[in-house]
Amino acid sequence: MMTALLGFAVLMALCFWGFRVGFATMMVGFVGFGLERGWTASLTMVAQQVMEDSQNYSLSVIPLFILMGVFIYRSGVSTDLYDAASMGLGKYKGGLALATVVACGGFSAVCGSTLATAATMSKVAMPQMKAYNYSDRLAAGTIAAGGTLGIMIPPSVPLVIYGIIAEQDIGQLFIAGILPGILLVILFLLTVVITVRLNPDSAPAAAELPTDRKRAALRGTTPVLVLFVIVLGGIYGGVFTATEASGIGACGAAAISFLRGHLRSLSDWRVCLVDAAMTTAKIFIVLLGAVVFTQFVNLSGLPYDLLDLVDEWNLGPAGLVAFICLIALLMGMVFETIGIIVLLVPVFLPALYASDVDMIWFGIIVVLVTEIGLITPPIGMNVFVVKSVLPQVRLAEIFHGVLPYIAALFIGLLAVYFVPQIATLLPSITR
Amino acid sequence: MSRAPETSSGIRTVLNKAIWILETISSAVILIMMVVTFADVIGRYVFHKPIFGGTEIVAALLALSIFSGLGVINARDDHIVVELFESPARNLVGPLAYEVSIQIFSVVCMTLIAVVLFTQALESYEYNKLTVVLEMPVYYVSGVVAVLAVISVISQVTGVVLKILDLRTQKKADAL
């Protein structure tokens, strides 16, 4: 156990110093394994892990869902989604902020990236809210928080990575994410309503949208909704696997983008494909580093020592999950989503299995906790993304603005923790 | 006196070309992956004929996409980083020493990956390993992946050299 803890300490030190996360995890894993078992064994282990995981068919779901998100991101559909959401809500006080939450939910349902959702909505929603004198705090805070919906509402890359590490069905995880995703949207909407009640001047009512814009919004939103239904419905109905759904989704997104006047030239295609390929490579080097590190951690016996500890402390399944959540919350202040999942989940797997924890429910809990990490200081990635798109808004204002949403996320987390059916109901129907 | 900037701009041109080629390979691979996955599903449901060895093809393409993309990410040093203490660490040891320490570490790790991939490719060549469905020699993919990993190391080293040259130029300019 001490070896693994030392390994973790070295890894943290390397990451904090600024070494690239993927390389740091791989080197610590390689050296740790080498010290325990010898260098030849360690080299063989690295070779096997890197080759096996980079050619794992199930993992091809990652680049394809990323590609689907990139096509949607660049199709300009976000404006229509935002207009469609504003149609019913814009005329109320705080209505544009409500529309932002709904549009973020809708956009992330086909985009899957929190950062892309936050960046896009910063460009689409902020000018509208500024035009109606919304406070920066409410507007930017809503966008940063709304972006986090991307990792819960399927398709979600963090859920895919969790599914592969924990050997859970990705389709079931996607289905499990639907109700918690809807719950979070509702909680965020309530947060806007309460914030506006407390400070009515922060969000005046907006004017009604012209009829032609309403029609265009509905026309633009329908194909996106259809794509979402095909992808999720296909998985839900057992028509295709998550990997196949990602291929269908990417092709569908390309078609939508093409019909909207994009992807009409080779350079358009190249930009999208390169974007997706680079994001894939960035994620995979972290993933490959993590699998190597996990081999070292497993060899050190840490997961089984933790299992004994859980027995000794008499934590029980709920206590164990609460303990893991606490660690994930602390990690979330510094690490990004994928880093937390790949480092934390494998360590606790034996203890979770031995405690009979529902691994689908646990996956949703872990992703929800990492979602909180996206907007909590000091490293709140979504807050930084909004700040980079809206340099005129002070960082402190955005962090202030997301505070009520952090509370809403905690309520959502507690709800899923105490009522696991929110996550397990839909998968139990399909099983 | 002016040879250093000329050399640096020459290296930069070569690196940019290499990046462009790697980007093109990775984007073409990811496009083929999308088309194969889509065609496999359509083939199965519409024509009752899925693509033979579709999953093996997609798995191989995934590896090619990762390692061609990695070459670009390495050259641009565009990796995921925890930026919390980066600035104080940089100030503590100086920008040049900091950058050198970070980049040497990355290069060593990437070299390790390239070495193990080459060993794997050689092993599969020596034992004439074949894939299960397509019965294609395993070294076709592992060999290309190993070559891509080596290119990745080269592009990474080139990127590092350019970065260090830039920092030295900036240091000299600051001193003036």
Image (cartoon, helix red, strand yellow):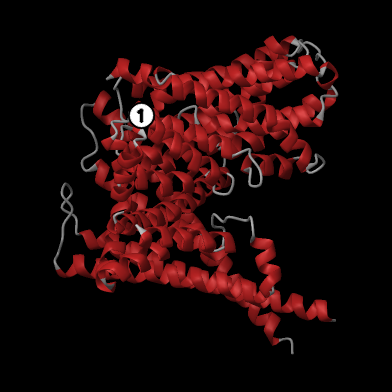
The image position of residue B121, as x and y in percent, is: 26, 66
Question: On the rendered structure, is A350 left or right of A76?
Answer: left
> Residue A213 occupies which quadrant of the picture?
top right
A259 or B75: nearer the viewer = B75
Location of the N terminus of chain A (image quadrant): bottom left
A276 or A319: nearer the viewer = A319
- Which amino acid type is marked by label 1? Ile
A365 or A251: nearer the viewer = A365
The image position of residue B165, as x and y in percent, is: 66, 77
Q: Chain of mark 1?
A: A
The image position of residue B63, as x and y in percent, is: 35, 54
Q: Residue at x 31, y 65 (%)?
A: A33
Q: Residue at x 60, y 38 (%)?
A: A116
Question: On the rendered structure, is A239 left or right of A251?
Answer: left
> In this view of the protein, can residue A74 be seen by the observer?
no
Q: Residue at x 63, y 21 (%)?
A: A188
The image position of residue A230, as x and y in percent, is: 41, 21
> Residue B84 occupies which quadrant of the picture?
bottom right
Label 1: which secondary element: helix
Q: How many marks?
A: 1
Q: Residue at x 39, y 29 (%)?
A: A318
Q: Residues within 10 Å of mark 1 (few under 14, many from 20)?
A: many
A320 or B142: nearer the viewer = A320
Can you say whether A268 is above or below B138 in the image? above
Can you say whether A4 is above or below B171 in the image? above
> In this view of the protein, can residue A382 be seen by the observer?
yes
The residue tagged 1 is A360
Location of the C terminus of chain A (image quadrant): top left
